[in-house]
Image (spheres, grey):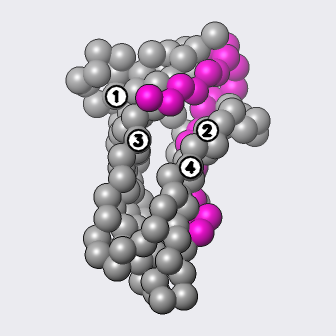
């Protein structure tokens, strides 16, 4: 499990999804789950065909996010694996404009539907 450290009294937290490599059709979900591991606080969804920004603001006040969990899931399929056989999807965590951490999931495209999931813990300092 990855950990994101942030300042409890700092600026707002943001999460941003991007595809850095690969020609893929992808849809993703970023679920914010309470520290109890059960209660879903918020769900952010999107796909890489949107024209809007894939950047989401987490709930305020910022200190409420201490101990919460992010479950990042993405379903995707390579569109042109003959010319682009690798993929890289990135989830960036910001506090204000400051990049806290960049998490990457990368691998080979199979030509079939693929799924990935990452679990991330938010820890306030």
Tags 1 and 4 touching, CB below 8 Å: no
Up-down relation of residue 73 to residue 9 (above or below) = below
- Circle 1 sits in a helix, a strand or a loop, which is it? strand
Q: Quadrant of residue 6?
A: top right
Q: Is residue 60 visible?
A: no
Is residue 20 part of the magenta span, yes or no?
Answer: yes
N-term-proximal mark, 2 vs 4: 2
Disc number placed over residue 118 in the picture, else none: 3
Neighbor class of circle 2 (other Cα within 10 Å; few <14, some 14-19, many 20+) is many
The segment highlighted magenta reads 1-21
Instruction: Determine the image quadrant of residue 113.
Output: bottom left
Disc 4 or 3, which lies upstream in sequence?
4
The CA span between labels 1 and 3 is 13 Å
Q: Is residue 103 left or right of residue 31?
A: right
Q: Helix or strand or loop: what does disc 3 sit on?
A: strand
Chain-order first, disc 1 or disc 2: 1
Residue at (61% x, 64% y) in the render: 20
Quadrant, the N terminus: top left
Q: Residue at left 61%, top 38%? A: 93
Q: Secondary structure at mark 4?
A: strand
Q: CA distance from mark 2 to mark 4?
A: 12 Å
Residue 21 percent coordinates (x, y): 59, 69
Q: Which residue is mark 1?
A: 33
Can you tell which of label 3 and label 2 is closer to the viewer?
A: 3
Horizontal and vertical percent position of residue 13: 60, 32
Of callouts 3 and 2, which one flags the residue occurring earlier in the amino acid sequence?
2
Most extreme residue toward the right, as rendered?
A: 98
Q: CA distance from mark 4 to mark 3?
A: 10 Å
Task: Inspect the magenta stretch and tell me whether residue 89 lies in it.
Answer: no
- The residue that disc 4 covers is 104
Can residue 107 be spotted in the picture? yes
Look at the picture and state if 27 lies above or below 24: above
């Amino acid at each position: 499990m990855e950990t994101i450290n942030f300042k409890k009294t700092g600026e707002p937290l943001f999460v941003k999804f991007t595809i850095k490599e690969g020609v893929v059709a992808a849809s993703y979900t970023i679920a914010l789950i309470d520290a109890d591991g059960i209660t879903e606080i918020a769900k952010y969804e999107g796909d890489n065909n949107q024209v809007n920004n894939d950047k989401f603001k987490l709930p305020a006040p910022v200190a409420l996010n201490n101990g919460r969990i992010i479950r990042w899931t993405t379903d995707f399929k390579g569109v042109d694996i003959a010319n682009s056989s690798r993929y890289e999807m990135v989830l960036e965590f910001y506090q204000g404009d400051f990049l806290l951490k960049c998490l990457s999931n990368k691998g080979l495209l199979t030509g079939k539907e693929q799924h990935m999931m990452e679990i991330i813990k938010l820890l306030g300092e």
